[in-house]
Amino acid sequence: MIYGFPDVGRHGLGHSLLAWGRCQLWCRDRDATPLSPRWLRLRLGPYLRREHDKRNYFLLFRSGNAIGGLRKAWILATTRKIDESDAANVNDAEPAVVVFRSIPDNDIRRDFAALRGEGAWLRGQLEAMTLPRHLPSGSASPHVAIHVRLGDFSVSDPERAQSGQQNIRTGIDWFVSALQSLRAALGESMPAIVYSDGRDAELSPLLRLPSVVRAPAQSAVTDLLSIARADALIGSGSGFSIWGSLLGDVPRLSAPGQQLTKVLDHPDAEIELAQGAAVPERFAERVLQRRRLSGQRQPCAA
């Protein structure tokens, strides 16, 4: 028996899901059996920073298509471990567990490149793993999702951001400008929903705009799956934004230097937009096309 095990570590959900996604795809293509992640981890950072999301991901997920519980524990305790880098050398004659790790120095561009084109399939696996109460309910009406990552990101620095450095906040003024430019290109004030770990006071220039509301307090995976149902995404330089775009094939606007990587098949569906610049017509066309298809989308499976 050959198994795959995603060692998700103590990272945020977006980073943790990179190991999970690679493991899921390898198990599917190798006809191996996935083991469920070990989500129960002590994460002190969210408590020290007084973040709303304490990253208690063990409260969000079940085993889904993977082996969990005591059987998983037994397999991990008794079966030979092989690192992901040696997965090609696995021999079917001997049981083995191939371990996929989420580690701080992972290359986000490389890791997402391995998932490109697999968003719909991975979304199905993520929904199957998510407890029903954390799945978005009903059908999504046309809207723009805006993901503003603050939390443990460093203070906004446009020069460093434009150079492609990661874990840097994007200025709120850029989000305001991006939404206004997108609405101008669409020819309408499409409603917008803000997903953020910031405080209302920090988001106030954005929340004051017409037809902009903040998403209700909900779990990280609910936010992620909700973003995946939007018609467009104005994102941060964050793996969470990239995941939202990938899972739902959502056209994504990013600040200069903060796109980080492309995960969609259409080159005009992921662009970097300078503050005050006009949104390209082809990007707006893709958003309008998604809006026309909104009524045909199916709600998440319970």
Image (cartoon, grey):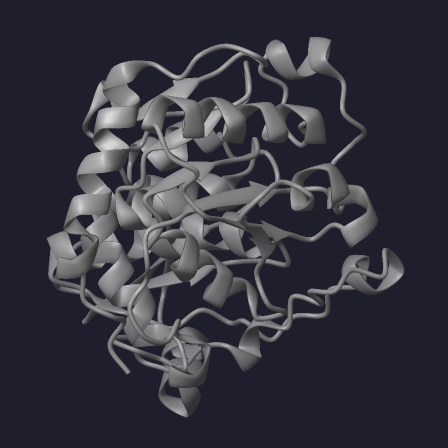
Q: Is residue 197 left or right of residue 273?
A: right
Q: Is residue 105 left or right of residue 280?
A: right
Q: What residue is shown at x 71% (from left), y 8% (from top)?
A: 159
> Is the N terminus in the top left, top right, bottom left or bottom right quadrant?
bottom left
Q: What residue is shown at x 55% (from left), y 37% (from top)?
A: 238
The x and y percentages for residue 58 are 55, 77
Residue placed most toward the observer, 172 or 134: 172
The x and y percentages for residue 293 are 15, 49
Residue placed most toward the observer, 83 or 101: 101
Q: Is residue 30 left or right of residue 80?
A: left
Quadrant assignment, res 30: bottom left
Quadrant assignment, res 174: top right
Q: Is residue 285 left or right of residue 48?
A: left
- Relative to 27, residue 133 above or below: below
Q: What residue is shown at x 12% (from left), y 52% (from top)?
A: 29
Q: Residue 169: in sight, yes or no?
A: no
- Relative to 136, residue 69 above or below: below
